[in-house]
Amino acid sequence: MKDWQRQAFIKLVESFIGTPYEYGGGHGGISTHRLPKTFDCSGVIVVAAQLCRLLGWARDENSYSMWRVMEPTDDPQPGDLVFWYREGTEWIFHVEVLTKKIEDSWMCCGARGSMGGVVRTAGFERPGAILAGFRRW
């Protein structure tokens, strides 16, 4: 991904801050020529990636399927995706976009059903979740 694409992707995801969370939201894609009114964690990424022409996947990609097809990286950069799994399982259940690094801490943007149920920017911590790793476009 070129730097301008990375920046456009981040800005687009951040433009959805405040959009309500709904499981399955955003998975209708943009084929109706309208933006979705709700998002889940992978839905906001699918729509932003489609609008930035980064994504050629089917409209029903979820966090686990993204994890499987994207390139792993040990050197995360803004615009990369971060994935988590639940304790006691190895199933990927959540994905967000890394937006910026402040000192040694990453900020992420994504949709979460908890903590207000909206697309938002937050720190890296996810109670009850274990970092699975980072993936790059």
Image (cartoon, rainbow, N blue to C red):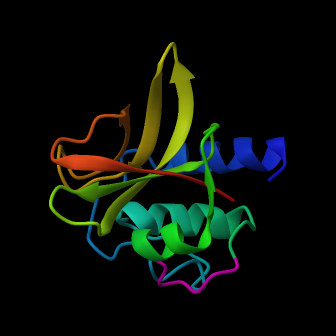
The reply to whether residue 129 is visible in this rendering is yes
Residue 40 included in the magenta stretch of the image: no
Left/right placement of residue 136 relative to residue 38 reads: right
* Magenta span main SS: loop
**Percent coordinates x, y for residue 27 in the rendering:** 44, 79
Q: Residue at x 62, y 44 (%)?
A: 10
Q: In this view of the protein, which residue sits in the foreground, 107 or 26?
A: 107
**Percent coordinates x, y for residue 74 in the rendering:** 60, 42
Question: Image quarter for residue 40?
Answer: bottom left
Q: In this view of the protein, which residue sits in the foreground, 57 or 47?
A: 57
Q: Residue at x 82, y 43 (%)?
A: 4
**Percent coordinates x, y for residue 120 in the rendering:** 37, 42
Q: Residue at x 18, y 45 (%)?
A: 116
Q: Residue at x 35, y 33 (%)?
A: 122
* Quadrant containing the C terminus in the rendered view: bottom right
Question: Image quarter for residue 100?
Answer: top right
- Furthest residue to the top? 103
The reply to whether residue 35 is visible in this rendering is no
Range drawn in magenta: 56-61
Left/right placement of residue 88 relative to residue 37 reads: left
Left/right placement of residue 20 relative to residue 107 reads: left
The vertical placement of 125 against 137, above or below, is above
Q: How many labels were placed on the picture?
A: 0
The vertical placement of 45 against 109, above or below, is below
**Percent coordinates x, y for residue 81 in the rendering:** 53, 52
The vertical placement of 18 against 93, above or below, is above
Residue 59 included in the magenta stretch of the image: yes
Q: In this view of the protein, which residue sits in the foreground, 102 or 118?
A: 102
